[in-house]
Structures are given as C-alpha cells and as structure tokens.
Image (tube, grey):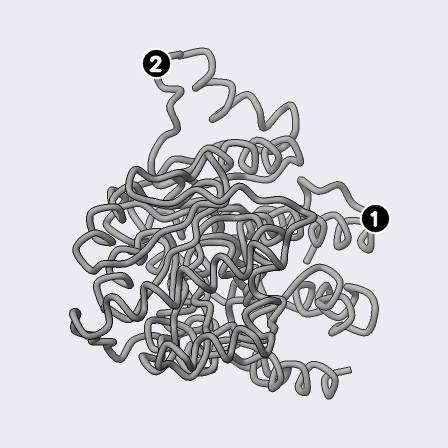
Amino acid sequence: MWRYLLDLDTDSSQPVGFGVVDPDYINIMVTGHQHALIGPVQEGLGEPWAVELARDAGAKGFRIVGCTCVGQDIQSRGGEVFAGHAGNNFTSEALLATGGIDLVISEFNCTLPGIEDVCRQYMVAQICLDDVAKKQNAGYLPFDPAGGESIARQVAGAAAESYRRRRDKVTVNVPRHGYPNSLAGFGERNLRAFLGGHYRPLIDLIATGQIKGLAAIVGCSNLTAGGHDVFTAGLTGELIRRDILVLSAGCTSGGLENLGFMSSTALEWAGEKLQKVCRELNIPPVLNFGPCLGIGRLEVVAAGIAAELQVDLPQLPLVLSAPQWLEEQALADGAFGLALGLPLHLAQPPFITGSKLVTRVLTEEMEKLTGGRVIVEGEIGKAAEQLEQIIHQRRAALGI
C-alpha cells in the first residue's frame, strides 16, 4: 500500500512558482476556473502546427502558465505544454511584471481588473473566452464547444504575434521563486486508493493519536487579513505543528505550495508525530486537492470517513477554515460545510453583521441545528487554538 503511494508521489511532484516561466518559449498565462474552456487550447498548442508557428516567431514552442484555480486544475491533470502553476489570483500582476508572459487567457472570475494596466505597460495581449471575464483592453473570443481547434489556432496566432511585437521591447526578469517538487493531484479517489481502497488506515492514525485530526484550509486570498496569503500560511503552519494534517483546495493551495508546504521541506515545520506519519507515507503535511472546485472533494472525503466510522459528520475531528475568503463562490462552499455540521473559521466576518439574528444563528444557534458554526478570529494563534480545541472535544466524544 505505502509502496504505491511512494511511486505516485515521485511521479506527481511538479515545479511551482514564477520559476516555471521559460523565456525561450511563448508563455500564455491562464486565469479562471473552467478547465473545459482551456483544455482545447492546451491540446492544440502541442500539435506540430503550433510548434512550427512558435519556431517561426523565434521561440522553442508554447507553454501554458497556470494562475488562479484553472492552473490548479491543469496541475492536477498534467498534460503537454503545461509549464506549471505560478500562483493564485494576487500573484497575477507580479507574474505579468516579470515580462515573461506574452498572452493572458481569461475565463470566468478571479481575473483581477488590475491586470489591464499591467498588460498595457508590458505589451501583453489578452483574450477573454467568457464575457464575464471581458477586460477593457482585451479581445473577446467566445468559446464554442465544437470549435476547439479553431480557438486554439486563434490563441496561438495571437500569442505568437504578441511575442514578436514585444520581446525586443521589454526586459524579461524571472526571479527565483517557488519550489521544484510540490506534490499535487490529490482527490477523494486516489487518497482512498493510497490507503488500500478504504479510509481505515487514516482513521487508525487519528484514533491512535498519530494525527490529531484533519483541517481543511480552503478558499481565496485577499490583501486585508494580514496581507497576501499571510493568514493562510500562518494558520497552516500552526496546525501542522500541532500534528493536524491539512488538506487544501482553492487559491490557498497556490499560496501554500509556493511556500513549500506541499513539498518535503515542510516536514521540518510539522509536529513530531505528524512528521513521522508523513515520512512513512512519503507525503507532505499539507495535501493539495487542487482548485476551489475541489472543496467538494474534501467533503466527499469527510463523508467517506464518517461512513467508515458509522458516525455522523459533526462528530468527526475535522475543522474547516477559509481564512482569507474573497470570491462569491466561497459563500456556497461555506454554507455547504456548515450544513454538513462542520465548524467554519474565517479571519474576517462575512457580510452579515448588520443583522443580529443572522449573526446569532450562524455563530451560536446553528451548532444545535447541524453541528456547524461560524468562528470569526483574526489572530492566527488564537484561531489555531480554537480549531485544535474543537478537534480535542470531538476526539474525546468519540473516546479516542
């Protein structure tokens, strides 16, 4: 069983961060959430006609650079021409400022409006595949499911033209950034496969206290809860130090992997018991479930563990945190977790404090209804203490 995990770990390690940008290639940054729209472009850029087009422009070929959740999605799937995942939404402006990006493809949300001026400054062309993501100085190419090759050719042509127009007029300066061996691609299926087809080995690790419990650190990043990824990284570090295994999905994953939390480097930051478990399984103390759409997969894992134990979800030593939430889909994810009976931590209050009734229901009375409740705590240490305390309470109630 552990041998299988070891092999997959080796095959799934990937570079992350700005270092994935290779100036010798035509680099296309993708932002958004809908892999179905980017997939045909990715397939087309690996075809012989695309390679020839890139070489005619003076480059070695095309590369796709992930930014925001669609990059996380491609990272989980892999595939030709994918250079790697550079980071989450608030890294996009800095990534463009390296000069190494030649074209931006946007679809759906999380494409920051601020990139318009940066793209103009660095002469970076933009194409939007979804009218929701349309930018003022960007071209609009409506996605047609039946016209994947045509879209790929138009994107490739625009990227090659942008490369020719700008590369001798801008300075490309890609800093050393990120990690060379971040582990990605976890999901409810392969996690269960790692464990021999069922969750019993993970349950045993929790029952014996080798792992205190599980924490899902999910959602977005913002610039207000301490700064870009500051609270996310700090809370994650506190939790793994307390022997709590962290599972991440969303823009939190982009930030955490760039800091090394999803590589072997992070073992030294974990508690002694969690370190031992991670060394035996050859996994990092933070598991990357990919894009924000993967948050649902985390809840499938929770349901599977509860079924294996034959207990209800609110009894599990499992906590949620969306410390630096931002986007509107975070509301649906948070409501789903609360409905399942899981406690949800936020570093900043949601937009409900104008109603005493709603605030009281979410922070106090919901625990009697579903077992879940909202915990608002803006200090990293105190938030970690509260989440650990909940895990201890649930462990005691289960008699472990």
The residue that mark 2 highlights is 354
Instruction: Judge the density around disc 2: few (<14), some (14-19), many (≥20) Cα neighbours within 10 Å.
Output: few
In x, y percent, where is residue 367? 58, 28
Q: Which label is found at residue 77?
A: none
Disc 2 from disc 1: Cα separation: 40 Å
In x, y percent, where is residue 374? 48, 32
Extreme front residue here?
A: 56
Q: Quadrant of residue 95?
A: bottom left
Placement of the C terminus among the 4 image quadrants = bottom right
Q: Which label is found at residue 310?
A: 1
Q: Residue at x 42, y 82 (%)?
A: 55
Q: Residue at x 53, y 73 (%)?
A: 50
Secondary structure type for disc 1: loop
**From the viewer's perspective, is the residue at label 2 or at label 1 nearer?**
2
Q: Residue at x 43, y 67 (%)?
A: 65
Q: Earlier in the sequence, mark 2 or mark 1?
A: 1
The answer to whether residue 376 is above or below residue 279 is: above
